């Protein structure tokens, strides 16, 4: 991930008022995760499973924090149950920032099926999302997604693709 993309993610989280971030360490998101963890404006809670992160973020919201989840594409699938029973059923917003593996331009063969499952799953779960391909659009997309998450009391997602996550895009 390019340095400019990492900076845009951190700026977006800050502009959105995010002060609590949970994440499963992930190679696609290493630079962004390290930047968030090093920034004293965020309380960061690494987890061993993305499903746990939804519970951690729900608890943070109930405790007065503004949570975000830096989650892998496949982590959304692994988290469908807690996302449904905690966040959707109990009207607990959480912003998901996701490196969208399997999007067009991804040259890794084993992530290809995610192109056919990620967006349909978000639609089925009634999670509003946007796909961002340009670094210049990242900060505003994160800010807008958090605004909607809080207003609607629903999870939202920003799927990062194109030049945001691919070095050669």
Image (spheres, grey):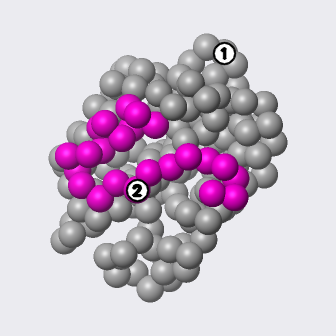
Q: Position of residue 11 (x, y in %)?
A: 28, 32
- At a point 64% along the width and 35% down the height, the residue shown is 154
Q: Which residues are magenta?
A: 123-145
SS category of the residue bearing label 2: strand
Residue under label 2: 131
| 92 horizontally vs 21: left or right | right
> What residue appears at the point 35 percent right and 62 percent down from the top-left corner?
161
Q: Where is residue 7? Give x, y as percent.
A: 23, 40
Image mark for residue 63:
1
Judging depth in this view, the residue of 61 and 132 nearest the camera is 132
Considering only order in the chain, which callout, 2 or 1, is on the residue closer to the N terminus?
Answer: 1
101 falls in the magenta region: no
Q: Is residue 9 visible?
A: no
- In the picture, measured across the screen, residue 160 lies left or right of residue 88, that is left
> What's the residue at 60%, 71% (across, down)?
117
- Would you say residue 134 sits in the magenta stretch? yes
Q: Position of residue 26 (x, y in %)?
A: 46, 57
Q: Is residue 167 above or below residue 138?
A: below
In this rendered view, identify the residue nearer to me: 28 or 144: 144
In this view, the residue in front, 97 or 25, is: 97
Q: Height in image: 84 above or below 55?
A: below
């Amino acid at each position: 991930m390019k340095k400019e993309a990492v900076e845009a993610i951190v700026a977006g989280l800050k502009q959105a008022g995010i002060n609590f971030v949970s994440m499963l360490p992930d190679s696609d998101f290493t630079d962004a995760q390290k930047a968030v963890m090093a920034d004293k404006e965020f309380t960061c809670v690494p987890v061993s499973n993305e499903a746990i992160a939804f519970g951690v973020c729900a608890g943070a919201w109930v405790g007065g924090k503004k949570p975000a989840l830096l989650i892998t594409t496949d982590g959304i699938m692994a988290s469908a149950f807690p996302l449904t029973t905690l966040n959707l059923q109990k009207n607990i917003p959480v912003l998901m920032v996701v490196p969208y593996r399997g999007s067009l331009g991804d040259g890794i063969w084993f992530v290809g099926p995610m192109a056919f499952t990620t967006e349909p799953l978000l639609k089925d779960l009634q999670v509003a999302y946007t796909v961002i391909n340009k670094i210049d659009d990242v900060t505003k997309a994160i800010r807008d997604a958090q605004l909607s998450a809080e207003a609607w009391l629903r999870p939202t997602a920003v799927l990062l693709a194109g030049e945001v996550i691919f070095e050669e895009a």
